[in-house]
Image (spheres, rainbow, N blue to C red):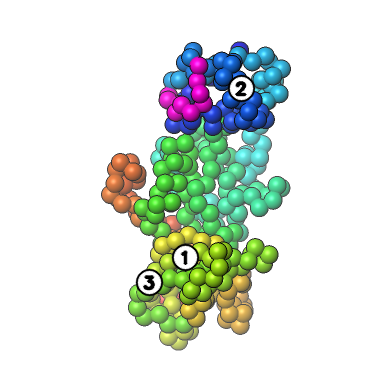
Amino acid sequence: MKEIVIKDNEAGKRLDKFLGQYLSKASTGFIYKMLRKKNIVLNGKKATGQEKLENGDIVTLWLSDDTFLKFANERLARVERGEGVSVTEFTKAYKSIKGIEVIYENKDVLFVNKPVGVLTQKAEQGDVSLNEWIVGYLLHEKTIEPESLITFRPSVSNRLDRNTSGIVICAKTLQGAQMMAKGLKERTFKKYYRTVVSGIIDKSEEISGYLTKDSKTNTVTISKNEDGDDSSYIETAYSPVDTNSKWNLTFLEVELRTGKTHQIRAHLSSIGHPIIGDPKYGNEKVNDSFKQTYGLKSQLLHCYRLEFPNDTEAFGELAGKEIVAPLYSKFGNLVKDKFKE
């Protein structure tokens, strides 16, 4: 028999979803069978699996030790075998990834300034990414205990391309993950990027179109009209921060109204203002010039700030806040060299 007391990071989950994580090697059919036979009960009573868990609820599993170990998730099984929760990949990531700056943190969320060259999430099994760094950081700061990873793992809420820098939102708790997921989906807070583009842009503009992704080449194309079922509607707004007519450059702030793969990079390129340093959508000759002068090897695109509405019910202590991530050194030095700001 196993008795589980529901804590903050499990509260709010449906019982069947929780059991699916806890007994990750069991089929859904097996879990529902155990519920029907009262081998799994909630607060001592028969449950359907549809119940929403609350803090302090008790889930009891009347299963043999062998059955439990057969179906338990790997971290849980290690604990039951007395091996403890493995945190090696997280501590490795925390020690190996350099240059990540924590710019804001509360009990539910963490905002970091991601450098160029760091993966937000793993692309392949052997990768080390920000997702693992977050857990390593929280373990190092003793904000979480290894055992808490059995049923909830802190993770990123938004993604940036490997060579795009700036703000990444990280959820420390289930409540934080739900709050950020809802805000991102409903676009109730604003995301602004800073970039440098070819050409002079002297006024603010709102542009829209349709984006189509080519998975084989990992590139996208932009069109004014919908191009089949694979096209996604996009909106991008931008305002010039400064211009340099001698170098034919604009320092631009971009509001991401919709969040699609390579949206800003491809959308600006499609209107004749490619981002400096962009290897996929930029101007090769211009990029080569900046590579020689500044050692620039990737696009000048930085998630610069987030603006949260003054809605305490939706965002708690984040309501009305502005989160800002300073430009990384190479980007900042270029801006200082070419613009007034």
The nearer-to-camera label among 2 and 1 is 2
Of 294 and 30, nearer the camera is 30
Q: Which residue is mark 1?
A: 233
- Residue 33 numbered tag: 2
Q: Earlier in the sequence, mark 3 or mark 1?
A: 3
* Mark 2 vs mark 3, CA separation in Å: 54 Å
Q: For residue 269: magenta? A: no
The amino acid beneath tag 3 is Glu
* Mark 3 vs mark 1, CA separation in Å: 14 Å
- Residue 206 numbered tag: 3
The amino acid beneath tag 2 is Lys
Could you tell me residue 235's position as x and y percent? 43, 66
Q: Earlier in the sequence, mark 2 or mark 1?
A: 2
Per the rendered image, the range of residues in magenta is 46-55
Of 243 and 32, nearer the camera is 32
The part of the image, by quadrant, that contains residue 119 is bottom right
The secondary structure type at the circle numbered 2 is helix
